[in-house]
């Protein structure tokens, strides 16, 4: 961890706990700051706050008193999910108090190389791919993934050495709270429209994403999706060396896909067939990861080896198992129609689709054109009838209504044949039956494991 005196003997307010707030508070205390934490959850039901109090940190819980800001704080470190129109944040900015996020603290103390990854879609997969590629065949140091991926950046930065790499997934929320963060390599996977309720409009959202490169210099690299005209235009406004990637065109100065292979600067790196994750979007994710790996000196053999072991990020079109020629995929993270469209577009084989969940009042008519390769539709949850209606409009002959994900798995196998794909991609949130999409995805994978075991035992008897 780098020596950092910026916060020593300074009063710092940490607004909001959760993982990022907890780790920010602990790091600030270690850096010699006088830390106050303010969290909305009542102290009686707030074990995180109690832990910080036992560490000597002042905690104000249960509300956000605006008068707290009269205590002459030098900095505010806010949870990235708290919007900038929050009264506490607005008041801090009016008082001229810098408002940071936890990733900025992490960047300030990090000794190793920082690789930042942002974008609307594919951040988590690309971050994970890069980390795996950088660790393939590595003899000195280690690559760590951190940030929006669910691992607090400040916790990783405290332990990473100068020989290590930290691959940090960065959301637009986190990037709005940086000042000096400067990735040696920055990646923007793509930019579409998202989080407008937080940012106000698309222009502000894009501006937040672009902050990933604002402190880069000509010594740094910016890896960009060259298939997006908007990013090609924005590339003119970065001081970093641009490294483009494209799924549709040959780029002699970057990464590209051509004739069934992935290339970097004219050199073939690997066959696309060696990727274990399906879909054109994953080709783009892989191209971005290859570009970073090659910039870091990773060999082609190591890249191929790492991709051979990469079956996807958990709950995101994740390969689970194969049984008698049927492949099972867990895409529980598909909590909306767009995500399920992407998943369905990733397969050319006949699909047994498992879908359903929380009813948010929408129909599923826009999903109908993407159901062409679905031979059997198995539906559950509050939206079962609506999804059944969409399946009928698509001309699917076999539609089954069942209780939940677990009961859908053996049914899917009964209706499948060798060569089929069995895909959980619900197109709905999980909250009607499950605490979150992770719990729903685990119910699916557990049911698949049980099915494989029972079928194997039966066939072996």
Image (cartoon, helix red, strand yellow):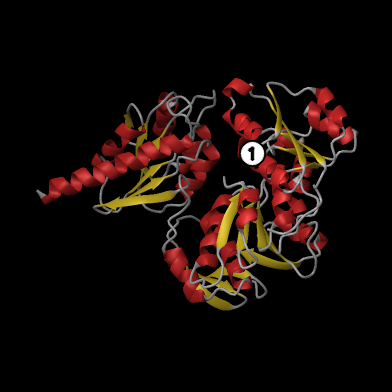
Relative depth, front residue between 28 and 123: 28
Relative depth, front residue between 27 and 169: 27
The quadrant holding residue 213 is bottom right
Residue 313, how many percent across, how many down? 48, 51
Relative depth, front residue between 18 and 81: 18
User: How many numbered marks does the figure carry?
Assistant: 1
Residue 279, how many percent across, how many down? 48, 55
Residue 207, how many percent across, how many down? 78, 47
Relative depth, front residue between 205 and 8: 8
Residue for point 39% across, 31% down: 392
> Residue reaching furthest left?
461
Q: Label 1: state its secondary structure.
A: helix
Q: Is residue 136 above or below residue 148?
A: below
Residue for point 67% across, 74% down: 253
Left or right: 428 as drawn, with respect to 49: left
Left or right: 233 as drawn, with respect to 384: right
Q: Is residue 327 above or below residue 333?
A: below
> Residue reaching furthest right?
95
Residue for point 46% across, 44% down: 315
Can residue 165 be seen in the rendering of this structure? yes
Can residue 260 be seen in the rendering of this structure? no
The quadrant holding residue 224 is bottom right
User: Which residue is label 1 attached to?
Assistant: 22
The quadrant holding residue 15 is top right
Residue 176, how many percent across, how many down? 76, 44
Q: Is residue 293 above or below residue 102?
A: below
Residue for point 79% across, 69% down: 218
Alpha-carbon neighbours of circle 1 within 10 Å: few (<14), some, or many (≥20)? Answer: many
Point out the image quarter for the N terminus.
bottom right
């Amino acid at each position: 961890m780098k020596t950092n005196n910026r916060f020593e003997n300074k009063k710092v307010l940490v607004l909001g706990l959760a993982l990022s707030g907890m780790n920010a508070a602990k790091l600030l205390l270690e850096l010699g700051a006088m830390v106050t934490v303010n969290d909305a959850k009542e102290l009686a039901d707030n074990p995180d706050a109690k832990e910080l109090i036992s560490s000597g940190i002042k905690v104000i819980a249960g509300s956000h008193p605006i008068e707290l800001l009269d205590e002459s704080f030098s900095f505010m470190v806010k949870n990235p999910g708290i919007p900038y129109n929050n009264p506490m944040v607005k008041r801090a900015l009016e008082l001229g108090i810098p408002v940071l996020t936890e990733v900025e603290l992490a960047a300030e103390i990090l000794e190793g190389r920082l690789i930042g990854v942002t974008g609307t879609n594919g951040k988590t997969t690309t971050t994970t791919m890069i980390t795996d590629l950088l660790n393939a065949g590595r003899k000195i140091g280690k690559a760590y993934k951190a940030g929006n991926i669910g691992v607090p950046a400040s916790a990783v930065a405290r332990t990473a050495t100068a020989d290590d790499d930290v691959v940090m997934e960065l959301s637009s929320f986190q990037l709005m709270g940086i000042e000096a963060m400067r990735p040696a390599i920055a990646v923007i996977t793509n930019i579409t429209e998202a989080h407008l309720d937080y940012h106000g409009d698309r222009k502000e959202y894009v501006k937040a994403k672009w902050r990933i490169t604002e402190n880069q210099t000509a010594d740094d690299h910016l890896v960009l999706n060259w298939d997006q005209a908007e990013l090609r235009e924005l590339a003119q406004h970065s001081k970093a060396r641009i490294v483009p990637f494209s799924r549709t065109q040959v780029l002699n100065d970057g990464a590209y896909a051509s004739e069934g292979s992935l290339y970097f600067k004219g050199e073939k790196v690997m066959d696309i067939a060696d990727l274990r994750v399906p879909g054109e979007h994953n080709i783009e994710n892989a191209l971005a990861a290859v570009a970073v790996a090659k910039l870091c000196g990773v060999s082609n053999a190591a890249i191929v080896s790492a991709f051979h072991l990469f079956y996807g990020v958990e709950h995101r079109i994740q390969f689970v198992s194969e049984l008698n020629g049927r492949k099972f995929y867990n895409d529980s993270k598909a909590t909306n129609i767009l995500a399920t469209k992407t998943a369905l577009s990733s397969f050319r084989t006949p699909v047994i689709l498992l879908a359903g969940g929380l009813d948010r009042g929408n129909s599923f008519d826009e999903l109908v054109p993407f159901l062409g390769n679905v031979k059997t539709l198995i539906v559950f949850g509050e939206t079962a009838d609506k999804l059944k209606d969409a399946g009928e409009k698509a001309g699917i002959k076999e539609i089954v209504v069942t209780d939940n994900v677990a009961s859908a798995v053996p049914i899917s196998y009964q209706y499948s044949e060798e060569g089929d794909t069995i895909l959980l991609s619900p197109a709905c949130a999980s909250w009607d039956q499950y605490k979150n999409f992770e719990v729903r995805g685990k119910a699916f994978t557990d049911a698949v494991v049980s099915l494989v075991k029972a079928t194997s035992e039966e066939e072996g008897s």
